[in-house]
């Protein structure tokens, strides 16, 4: 970790190749979004300017391991997975942490089995007000300053969305959340904001257009209600609660898509109420976009546009931000999401997660046979560097290159020439 970061995140999550690349970019081309060129023999690997653990993830892992180290004798729980990465969650389990809820939202530890002197951590996504109330019934004071400082690992950028939503709700705006309704972060945001505002969750630009058509008077209330079902707060009144709008997002969504959703709804409000009254009916909320998510996505676009033959993206199959990196790359090239090096079976076979089908698939003849060649590699915000490091080593090995070839390549890192 660089000086000033969380030095108690386990250093076995780092990797020598990735560390050298990060040090190189810290010293050279920090502001450029052009990728790093890492040449191993005749193989060119493109690594984006930004990838891997973001600030919020580093902070959450730091807090979790601090809790384990400071009170090893106490029962320690996490509300759910701390981040969407199997390596980190499995290690925390091996260290003794238990999850109150599994990945499907099913309760694993009953409320009455948690004692007031147990340690309970809230994950980086945050959690719902209903779960916080359950913890308080178990004797865990989730409102205490010490709890917030030491055991609430909610990403500060998620908390920022909640605060902004609360402010706008109190000002009379309905909050549109651009996100996946069943994602832990969106559920947390939805539950916190709906205490202060009418709230509706919109998945994408297609759903935003349905809302826009209703605002323009081209869609009936029944038609809109049939589509959205329960994706809005209790008591939501379509005739009343779409008159003043503000958009916030699940921080792992594509920033460009959030801007598109906002643009669609803003245009509808202007059509309905006129430009001279738009300021009353619409408020700009671009200040809630997560800078780290934006950086990673923009850097991935810069890597994608550099002309690789394929992309390998490393991260959890249930990681939303990682899935968006796959989509960015897939616009230009074959793209494969893997959780670790074991999914790269050989130069002939790769087992990867299909984000559209939501299933693991086996693809044959995935790796170009001829050299020279160029492959793009990146990782999601919840992926430890060690996993990306291992994937790079496995890909290089598929071409017959070894440790000495990698060492020579690390001595000659460069920022890709854009000419």
Image (cartoon, grey):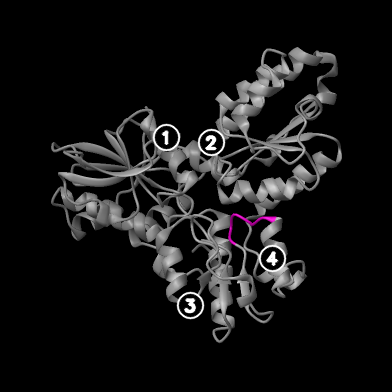
Q: What residue is shown with label 4?
A: 134
- The residue that appears at 49% across and 51% down in the rendered structure is 381
Q: Which numbered disc, 2 or 3, marks the residue that appears first in the sequence? A: 3
Q: What residue is shown with label 1?
A: 327
Spatial CA distance of label 2 from label 3 is 35 Å
Q: Position of residue 96 (x, y in %)?
A: 48, 77
Residue extending furthest bottom? 73
Task: Say which element carries label 1.
Answer: helix
Q: Main secondary structure of the magenta part?
A: loop
Whether residues under marks 3 and 1 lie with C-beta atoms below 8 angstroms apart, the answer is no
Circle 3 or circle 1, nearest the eye: 3
Q: Position of residue 367 (x, y in %)?
A: 19, 40
Q: Which residues are magenta?
A: 123-128
Spatial CA distance of label 1 from label 2 is 10 Å
Magenta-span inclusion, residue 126: yes
Up the image or down, 321 lies above or below 74; here it is above
């Amino acid at each position: 970790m660089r000086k000033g970061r969380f030095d108690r995140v386990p250093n076995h999550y780092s990797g020598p190749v990735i560390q050298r690349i990060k040090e190189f970019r810290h010293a050279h081309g920090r502001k450029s979004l052009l990728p790093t060129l890492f040449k191993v023999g005749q193989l060119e690997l493109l690594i984006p300017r930004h990838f891997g653990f973001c600030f919020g993830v580093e902070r959450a892992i730091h807090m979790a391991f601090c809790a384990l180290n400071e009170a090893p004798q106490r029962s320690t729980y996490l509300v759910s997975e701390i981040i969407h990465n199997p390596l980190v969650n499995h290690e925390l389990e091996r260290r003794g942490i238990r999850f109150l809820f599994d990945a499907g939202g099913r309760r694993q530890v009953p409320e009455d089995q948690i004692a007031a002197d147990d340690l309970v951590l809230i994950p980086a996504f945050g959690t719902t007000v209903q779960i916080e109330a359950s913890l308080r019934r178990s004797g865990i004071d989730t409102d205490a300053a010490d709890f917030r400082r030491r055991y609430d690992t909610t990403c500060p950028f998620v908390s920022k969305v909640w605060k902004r939503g609360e402010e706008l709700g109190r000002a009379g705006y309905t909050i549109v959340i651009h996100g996946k309704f069943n994602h832990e972060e969106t559920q947390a945001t939805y539950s916190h904001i709906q205490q202060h505002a009418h709230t509706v969750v919109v998945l994408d630009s297609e759903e935003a257009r349905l809302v826009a058509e209703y605002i323009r008077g081209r869609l009936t209330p029944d038609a809109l209600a049939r589509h959205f079902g329960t994706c809005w707060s209790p008591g939501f009144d379509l005739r009343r609660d779409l008159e003043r709008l503000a958009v916030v997002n699940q921080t792992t969504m594509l920033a460009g898509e959030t801007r598109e959703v906002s643009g669609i709804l803003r245009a509808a409000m202007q059509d309905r109420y006129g430009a001279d009254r738009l300021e009353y009916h619409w408020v700009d909320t671009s200040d809630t976009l997560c800078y780290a998510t934006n950086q990673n996505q923009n850097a991935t676009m810069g890597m994608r546009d550099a002309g690789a033959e394929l992309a390998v993206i490393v991260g959890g199959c249930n990681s939303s931000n990682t899935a968006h990196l796959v989509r960015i790359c897939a616009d230009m090239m074959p793209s494969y999401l893997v959780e670790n090096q074991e999914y790269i079976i050989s130069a002939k076979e790769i087992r990867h997660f299909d984000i559209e089908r939501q299933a693991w698939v086996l693809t044959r003849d995935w790796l170009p046979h001829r050299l020279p060649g160029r492959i793009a590699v990146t990782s999601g915000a919840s992926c430890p560097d060690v996993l990306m490091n291992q994937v790079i080593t496995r890909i290089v090995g598929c071409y017959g290159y070894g440790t000495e070839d990698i060492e020579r390549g690390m001595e000659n890192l460069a920022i890709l020439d854009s000419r």
